């Protein structure tokens, strides 16, 4: 493919340092699931490992890939683990999220026993996000049953917030209260056993807006990559902005520039007709390359420091743009799909607005196959 992504390792490290200062160095964990939100799993992890109290992934495959790449920091797998992968997970010294303390715990204890090792777990509590986790009133019983498995060690207790991006969020306080009550209920049992698990519930937005959610650890995802969790979060931090720097840019080049007659259609389905004679450039990137089809006739790229609107439908591997604002553009001219060129810029947030989605989806869906250049 012509072009690709450029990832600033300097920006990633800078963001990690900013976020560590926000919550305190011992509390900063960084989430690198989803191929590090599209930025590249191993390279991102290597860049920020010295600043991370812990790295968080979704799948065991991601954790094992980090270990194979030389990552030694604690790694928490937050998603479900297939029983067949338990041996590898324990061999890789991965910490596992646990919400089934019966059948799964028995399987986990058996795998650890076979390896003459211990499995480290973080018990997840459902505080009305209603996806994964034991119910708050079940936490004490769950931890007590875990005590019957000497092969399993309790490393943490955690939950996840559903609406922390909202400036005024009674639901966040409801969830935090449910979590804290569960922790109070299990405290006598933990005190008797001499265990002090890491308590964590906050991700990026909560860390920025709700300092009472910091607890023992905060899991930073989208903010690590220089992107804000939501418009509401940005507005709330307006008086105290964080100096976060987008780490990713996406660059290609024009492969064809052609003059299109007035009234002529451009692209599949004839969804755009030239209002006048105009120059149209072809960019060799489409929805197979991470450019959402929803950008058809509504997004823009940057050429020669000028915004150039997308015209016609985004195809699988090509997108057409109106070059009226870049009269000097020619085949071979640089095209900035995400990033800044001169006075103009297009961000992942712009793409998200045009596509009626969130910046998380934009960057995470950038294909693994895209070329990624890592720069300092």
Image (tube, rainbow, N blue to C red):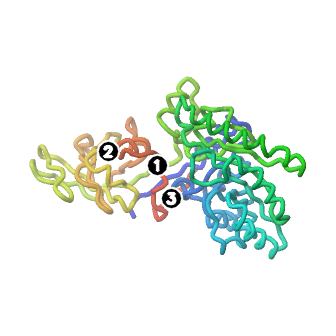
Label 3 near label 1: C-beta < 8 Å?
no
What is the secondary structure assignment of the residue under circle 2? strand
- Dot 2, how many residues are within 10 Å of its Cα: few (below 14), some (14-19), or many (20+)? many
Q: Give percent across and percent down for residue 202.
A: 64, 41
Give the CA distance from mark 1 to mark 3: 10 Å
The residue mark sitting in front, 2 or 3, is 2
Q: Which residue is mark 2?
A: 300
- From the image, which quarter does the N terminus lie in? bottom left
- Distance from label 2 to label 3 (Cα)? 22 Å
> Residue 63: which quarter of the image?
bottom right
**221 lies left or right of 259:** right
The residue depicted at 50 percent of the width and 58 percent of the height is 372
- From the image, tell me which residue sits under label 1: 249
Residue linked to disc 3: 372
Q: Residues within 10 Å of mark 1 (few under 14, many from 20)?
A: many
Q: Residue at x 66, y 75 (%)?
A: 84
Q: Secondary structure at mark 3?
A: strand
* Label 2 vs 1, first from the N-terminus: 1
């Amino acid at each position: 493919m012509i072009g690709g992504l450029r990832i600033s390792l300097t920006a990633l490290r800078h963001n990690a340092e900013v976020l560590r200062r926000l919550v305190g160095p011992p509390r900063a964990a960084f989430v690198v699931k989803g191929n590090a939100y599209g930025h590249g799993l191993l390279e991102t992890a290597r860049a920020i490992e010295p600043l991370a109290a812990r790295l968080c992934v979704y799948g065991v495959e991601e954790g094992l890939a980090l270990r194979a790449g030389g990552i030694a920091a604690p790694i928490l797998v937050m998603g479900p683990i297939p029983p067949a992968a338990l041996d590898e997970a324990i061999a890789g010294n991965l910490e596992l999220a646990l919400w089934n303390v019966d059948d799964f715990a028995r399987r986990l204890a058996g795998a650890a026993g076979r390896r003459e090792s211990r499995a480290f777990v973080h018990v997840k509590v459902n505080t009305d996000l209603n996806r994964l986790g034991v119910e708050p009133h079940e936490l004490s019983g769950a931890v007590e049953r875990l005590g019957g498995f000497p092969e399993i060690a309790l490393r943490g207790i955690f939950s996840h917030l559903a609406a922390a991006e909202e400036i005024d969020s009674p639901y966040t306080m409801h969830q935090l209260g449910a979590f804290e009550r569960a922790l109070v209920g299990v405290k006598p049992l933990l005190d008797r056993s001499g265990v002090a698990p890491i308590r964590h519930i906050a991700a990026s937005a909560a860390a920025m807006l709700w300092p009472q959610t910091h607890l023992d650890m905060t899991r930073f995802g989208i903010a690590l990559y220089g992107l804000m969790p939501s418009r509401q979060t940005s507005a709330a931090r307006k008086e105290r902005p964080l100096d976060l720097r987008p780490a990713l840019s996406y660059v290609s080049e024009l492969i064809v520039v052609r003059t299109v007659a007035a009234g002529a259609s451009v692209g599949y389905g004839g969804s755009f007709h030239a209002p006048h004679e105009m120059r149209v450039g072809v960019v060799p990137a489409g929805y197979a390359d991470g450019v959402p089809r929803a950008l058809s006739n509504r997004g823009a790229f940057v050429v020669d420091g000028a915004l150039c609107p997308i015209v016609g439908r985004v195809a699988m591997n090509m997108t057409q743009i109106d070059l009226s604002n870049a009269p000097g553009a020619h085949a071979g001219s640089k095209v900035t799909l995400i990033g800044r060129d001169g006075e103009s810029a297009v961000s992942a947030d712009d793409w998200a607005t045009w596509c009626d989605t969130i910046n998380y989806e934009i960057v995470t869906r950038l294909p693994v196959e895209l070329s990624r250049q890592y720069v300092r």
